[in-house]
């Protein structure tokens, strides 16, 4: 029994030994892989922490600055003329007072592109652009915009609707503004499109005035 045990040990001893030497020979390559994996892991952790910190900083900046987008409103209008040259060709002259305001407390903006369209129902009847301008925080600016329509084709149902509105002394137009706004926050700035919509109601020409309006601005 003892001899057998010794023999077993005798046999297993060299075996264990060779296994150890094999491990000893094979260890260096896995160790190198570990270094690479470790570096990757450290890099990932550092990168994740930076990402989270950046996120937190952006959230804090937004909470402190509370960005709002500028707004577009029609504060006044005068309807100078509506003239149908044959029932289907429309001529018109409307002046609107467009109020652009920047409600931000910490952000200056610049209106880089401004286009204002006038619609009767969903038919485009006049387009006008406004010169770009900068606008500081809290400022409002009123621009007089002259919308002129000359020989604009109106389908018969629309021209009869317009005639009815003129007779009832209440004319409804839709205004759609498209603006490119550049906002400056500290050293950075970003640009975006802004869309203003107004539905206005006026008394009849030649000295029509604004009766009601409903406006909203969205991104
Ligand atoms: C323009 O809009 C601003 C902000 O809504 C307002 O304070 C200002 O009174 C308006 N200006 C006119 C002329 O209506
Ligand atoms: C005028 O007619 C067109 C179809 O010809 C229709 O799509 C449109 O809604 C009509 N407009 C009004 C105000 O009745």
Image (cartoon, rainbow, N blue to C red):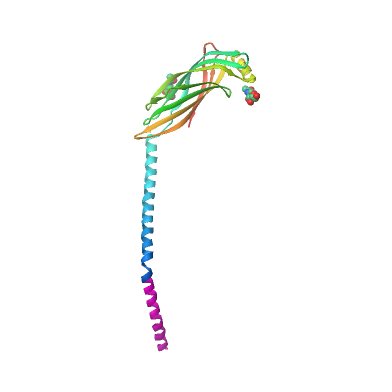
Query: Is 10 part of what is drawn in magenta?
Result: yes
The quadrant the N terminus occupies is bottom left
Residue at image coords 37%, 70%: 25
Compared across the picture, whether 37 is left or right of 173 comes to left
Compared across the picture, whether 115 is left or right of 56 comes to right
Magenta stretch prevailing secondary structure: helix
- Name the outermost residue toward the top: 206
* The quarter of the displayed image where residue 130 is located: top left
**For this rendering, which residue is in front, 135 or 132?**
132
Residue 46 position within the rendered picture, expressed as x and y whole percent measured from the top left: 36, 51
Residue 165 position within the rendered picture, expressed as x and y whole percent measured from the top left: 60, 16
Residue at image coords 38%, 69%: 26
**For this rendering, which residue is in front, 85 or 181?**
85
Query: Is 193 part of what is drawn in magenta?
Result: no
Residue at image coords 38%, 73%: 22
Residue at image coords 43%, 24%: 100
Q: Ligand 1 sits in which quadrant?
A: top left
Residue 137 position within the rendered picture, expressed as x and y whole percent measured from the top left: 37, 28
Residue 52 position within the rendered picture, expressed as x and y whole percent measured from the top left: 39, 46
Report the magenta residues as a range. 1-23
Classify 58 as above or below 167: below
Q: How many marks?
A: 0
Compared across the picture, whether 58 is left or right of 219 comes to left
């Amino acid at each position: 029994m003892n001899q057998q045990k010794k023999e077993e040990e005798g046999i297993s001893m060299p075996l264990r030994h060779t296994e150890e030497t094999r491990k000893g020979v094979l260890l260096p390559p896995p160790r190198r892989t570990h270094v690479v994996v470790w570096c990757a892991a450290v890099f990932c952790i550092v990168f994740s922490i930076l990402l989270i910190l950046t996120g937190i900083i952006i959230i804090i900046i937004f909470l402190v600055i509370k960005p709002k987008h500028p707004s577009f409103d029609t504060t006044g209008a005068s309807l100078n003329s509506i003239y149908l040259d044959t029932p289907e060709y429309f001529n018109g002259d409307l002046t609107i007072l467009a109020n652009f305001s920047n409600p931000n407390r910490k952000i200056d903006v610049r209106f880089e592109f401004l286009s204002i369209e006038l619609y009767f129902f969903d038919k485009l009847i006049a387009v006008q652009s406004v010169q770009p301008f900068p606008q500081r925080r809290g400022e409002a600016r009123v621009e007089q915009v002259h919308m002129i329509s000359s020989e604009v084709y109106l389908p018969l149902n629309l021209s009869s609707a317009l005639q009815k509105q003129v007779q009832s002394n209440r004319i409804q137009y839709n205004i759609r503004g498209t603006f490119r706004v550049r906002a400056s926050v500290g050293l950075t700035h970003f640009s975006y499109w802004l869309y203003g919509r107004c539905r206005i109601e006026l008394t009849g020409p030649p000295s029509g005035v604004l009766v009601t309006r409903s406006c909203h601005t969205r991104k």
